[in-house]
């Protein structure tokens, strides 16, 4: 039933613009406390590198079969070189990755023992691109868009300085002029800069903080208030708000609904938002069915939380889960009815 939707993903070219980073994992075990300070001693047994940030969004898109191009800025350091090689090895176009000598590549080092995070070390620069570099990045990105126009552009913002207000405005303007579907996973710094975007996907905490709203029970009425407040500032097409253990809320300007979370053995929520925005953008571009988009991305976000660390969705497993969970519900019925 869902095979036809997933097969459409292979026809789509998606450009991901935003902050890429290297996720480093130090795996080990701990069974004693340091005599030097009240901290655990970790005997490191292995090290692993993964593609993180906006790169993880691109990786999710590739795992689902889409053609993907990555647009970002890294340093000229070894981390940047390693990250670019890893991204290219996954079949993602890296022409849009620009190296800057005065920036370092973001590297988040996680120390893990027995599937539990003990510590995270962040190696990064988060200041905005300087005006000259900002202009060059815009020009380079738009030239690549013109040479090989994407069907979808995803803005993945981690507040590391690539998605400045000027970058956002220039790229969104181009997308509007050429009918390109746009989706954004925002962060606080430029939260309201994404005017007229198609899919706006904050999590509930981010939305409340940006709107200066107090915490309240997660009800459909409260979520519709949040959507309306976002719409008044953004004039966007679809709100897609992740609600952690409560699932996901969507509103398409006419109808809104909370989709409950499915029961999972949660191991790690790292990267779940990356998976959600990737799946949502593809399903929306392929079908324009907002409820189906929310249903499938809700499933995908839950699946990756069962894994430790940042991982991309497995397309076969997601398809199997769609057929198992959604075949007889509203989303499945909608799909069957065309």
Image (cartoon, helix red, strand yellow):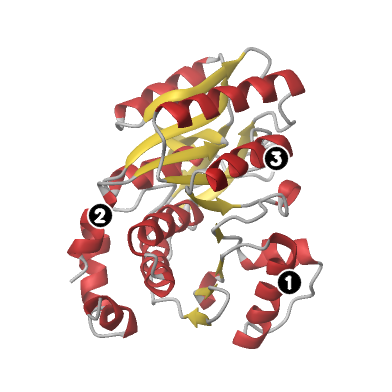
To which residue does mark 2 refer? 8
The x, y position of residue 212, in whole percent, is 81, 67
Residue 68 against residue 135 in the figure, above or below = below
Q: Secondary structure at mark 2?
A: helix
To which quarter of the image does residue 140 belong? top right
Task: Report, in whole angstroms, how far the alpha carbon at label 1 lies from the one at label 2.
Answer: 34 Å
Number of residues whose C-alpha sits closer than 10 Å to that of mark 2, classed few (under 14), some (14–19) or many (20 or more): some
In the rendered image, which quarter contains the N terminus? bottom left
Element type at marker 3? loop
Find the distance from the CA under tag 3 to the CA under tag 1: 48 Å
Q: Closer to the N terminus: mark 2 or mark 3?
A: 2
Q: From the viewer's side, name the closer residue of 76 and 162.
A: 162
Residue 84 sits in quarter: top left
Considering the image in quadrants, where does the C terminus appear? bottom left
Q: Which residue is mark 3?
A: 37
**Closer to us: mark 2 or mark 3?**
2
């Amino acid at each position: 039933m869902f095979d036809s939707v997933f097969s459409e993903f292979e026809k789509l070219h998606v450009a991901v613009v935003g902050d890429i980073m290297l996720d480093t994992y130090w795996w080990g075990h701990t069974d004693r406390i340091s005599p030097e300070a009240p901290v655990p001693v970790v005997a490191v047994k292995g090290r692993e590198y993964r593609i993180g940030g906006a790169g993880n969004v691109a990786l999710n898109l590739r795992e689902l079969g889409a053609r993907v191009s990555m647009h970002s800025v890294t340093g000229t350091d070894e981390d940047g070189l390693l990250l670019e090689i890893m991204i290219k090895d996954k079949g993602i176009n890296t022409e849009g990755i620009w190296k800057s000598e005065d920036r370092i590549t973001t590297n988040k080092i996680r120390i893990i023992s027995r599937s539990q995070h003990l510590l995270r070390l962040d190696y990064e620069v988060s200041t905005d691109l300087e005006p000259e570099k900002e202009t060059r990045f815009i020009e380079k990105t738009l030239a690549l868009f013109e040479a090989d126009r994407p069907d979808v552009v995803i803005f993945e913002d981690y507040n590391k300085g690539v998605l400045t207000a000027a970058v956002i405005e220039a790229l969104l303007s181009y997308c509007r002029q050429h009918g390109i579907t746009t989706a954004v996973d925002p962060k606080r710094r430029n939260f309201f800069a994404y005017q007229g975007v198609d899919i706006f996907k904050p999590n509930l905490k981010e939305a409340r903080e940006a709107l200066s709203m107090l915490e309240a029970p997660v009800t459909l009425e409260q979520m519709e208030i949040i959507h309306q407040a976002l719409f008044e500032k953004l004039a966007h097409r679809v709100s897609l708000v992740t609600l952690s253990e409560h699932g996901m809320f969507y509103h398409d300007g006419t109808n809104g609904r909370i989709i409950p979370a499915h029961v999972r053995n949660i191991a790690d929520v790292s990267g779940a938002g990356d998976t959600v925005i990737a799946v949502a953008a593809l399903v929306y571009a392929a079908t324009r069915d907002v409820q189906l988009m929310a249903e499938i991305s809700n499933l995908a976000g839950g699946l990756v939380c069962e894994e430790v660390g940042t991982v991309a969705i497995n397309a076969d497993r997601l398809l199997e889960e769609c057929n198992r969970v959604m075949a007889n519900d509203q989303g499945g019925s909608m799909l069957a009815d065309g």
